[in-house]
Amino acid sequence: MSVDVGEDADPITEINVTPLVDVCLVLVIIFMVTAPMMTQSKLSVTLPKAATDESKNEDHVTITIDKDGKINVNESVVFSIDQMESVLARKLAATDEQVVIIKADELLENGKVMDVMEAAKKVKPKKIYFATQHKKEGI
C-alpha cells in the first residue's frame, strides 16, 4: 500500500512531536514509580530494643542531679553551675576518654537538665551520655 504523492507535493520538513510526547510521558511515569524506591534503604537492619547497657570502662565523669536539683560530679557536691563547670573540667582533664554521663532524676524539670548539659558542653568532652534504666516489659 503506497501513496502516490506526485511531483507537486512538498517534502515534510517538520518534526512529528507525537512520538516525542509519548516517550516523555512514559519516562515521567517511570520516574514517578521508581522515585520512592530510591529513598528506601537497601540494607535490612534490625534496630536494638530500648534498653541500656552498663558502661564497661570506668574512665568517665558522672554528673548526678537529684529531684531537688542538687548536683554531684563524681560524688563531689557542687553548689552552682559555674562551680560544676570548673570541677568537671578538672576531672575530665584527668581522664583519657573524656566521656560525661548525666544521671538525672525522672521527676526533675527539663530546664535544669538542659542547664547542666549546656555547662558540660562548654568543657568540650568528646561524648555526653544520658543514663537510663531498662524498660520493663508491659509498661
Image: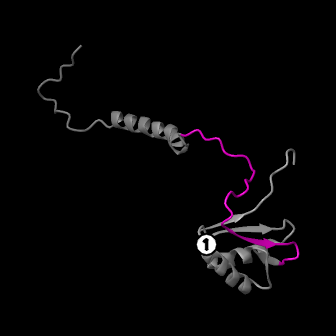
Which of the two residues, 13 or 128, is positioned nearer the viewer here?
128
Total numbered circles? 1
Reply yes or no: does residue 20 show up in magenta.
no
Decide: is 15 above or below 123. above
Report which residue position mark 1 lands on: 125
Which of the two residues, 109 or 88, is positioned nearer the viewer here?
88
Q: In x, y percent, where is residue 70?
A: 84, 78
Residue type, mark 1 in image: Pro
Q: In x, y percent, where is residue 96?
A: 59, 69
Q: Quadrant of residue 111?
A: bottom right
Reply yes or no: does residue 45 show up in magenta.
yes
Q: In x, y percent, where is residue 2?
A: 21, 16
User: Which quarter of the image is occupied by the N terminus?
Assistant: top left
Disc 1 is placed on an element classified as loop
The residue most toward the top is: 1
Q: Which residues are magenta?
A: 43-70
* 14 displayed left or right of 120: left
- For disc 1, the neighbor class at 10 Å (few under 14, some 14 to 19, many from 20) is some
Which of the two residues, 119 or 34, is positioned nearer the viewer here?
119
